[in-house]
Image: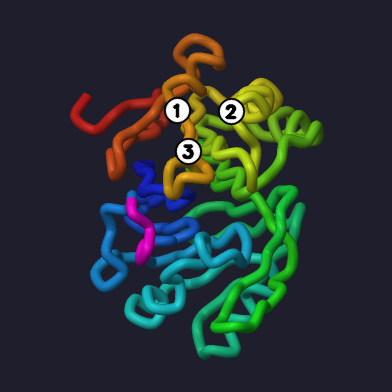
Amino acid sequence: MQYSWHGQSCVQIKTDTGKTILIDPYITGNPLSDLHAETVEADVIILTHGHNDHVGDTEQIAKRTDALIIGNAEIADYFSFKGLKTHGMHIGGQHVFDFGTVKLTPAIHGSTLQVGNELITLGIAAGILFTENEKTIYHAGDTALFTDMKLIGEQQEIDVAFLPIGDNYTMGPADASLAAQFIKAKKVIPMHYNTFPLISQNPVAFIERLEEGQGYVPAIGEVMTLSSSARFEKEGE
């Protein structure tokens, strides 16, 4: 399995079966993104919640690529009304797809989409556990620290975790470092920072809070590989 980070909370996963998954594809308007909504490929789009900086270019990409949109039931309904393919889930629910297994975890955050001058509430926020061939990536979504993260780590061995560190709207570095201890991920990658001034953070300072070797700050678009032995590798190693 290969994966990469593309600014804010946008993560791309390429499965062992050749499917491309986009999580929270906020591309247009994202100053850190190296992707282009007009050309990026996607077989599946998974959304953690309804905020505009996470839903991003979902509709445009799904219309062009015929991608399946996965999210909470309200998000799925919203996009199904637009004629797009969707699969609705909810917190604690798990589903086995032909490309891997998706489970939605709790996240403490809002989920309102702004469309023009209208605010549309789309269920509640979630995190994501994605598993393929016994390798698991945890995308925490936008969330505060909560003690039940310990249960997530106890119930599921996590190979790679993407944790928000921007503060103000999500956990900051101190709380995210506790979250890393709770979930016991083998590798932790910070996200949701430096997209705009209010969430400016030093990601290197964050990983210095973690156990030695646990944290990693990838370059935008850097491709990393999760091997069958769960060894973390950068492309080319």
Side of 129 relative to 106 (left or right): left
Where is mark 3, residue-wise?
200
Q: Amino acid at mark 1?
A: Asn
* Horizontal and vertical percent position of residue 109: 71, 53
- Residue 15 visible somewhere in the drawing: no
* Horizontal and vertical percent position of residue 147: 80, 32
Is 118 drawn above or below residue 186 in the view shown?
A: below
Labels 1 and 2: the sequence-earlier one: 2
Where is mark 2, residue-wise?
173
Is 55 drawn above or below residue 150 in the view shown?
A: below
Is 78 drawn above or below residue 35 in the view shown?
A: below
The reply to whether callout 1 and callout 2 are in contact (CB within 8 Å) is yes
Please report the bounds of the magenta region as a residue range: 27-31
Is 42 drawn above or below residue 8 in the view shown?
A: below
Whole-Å distance between the Cαs marked 1 and 3?
7 Å
Q: Nearer the viewer, mark 2 or mark 3?
A: 3
Q: Amino acid at mark 2?
A: Pro
Labels 2 and 3: the sequence-earlier one: 2
Whole-Å distance between the Cαs marked 2 and 3?
11 Å
Where is mark 1, residue-wise?
202
Q: Is residue 30 magenta?
A: yes
Q: Nearer the viewer, residue 179 or 88?
A: 179
Q: Residue furthest front?
A: 197
Q: Nearer the viewer, residue 233 or 79?
A: 79
Q: Residue furthest top?
A: 212
Q: Amino acid at mark 3?
A: Ser
Res. 94 mark: none
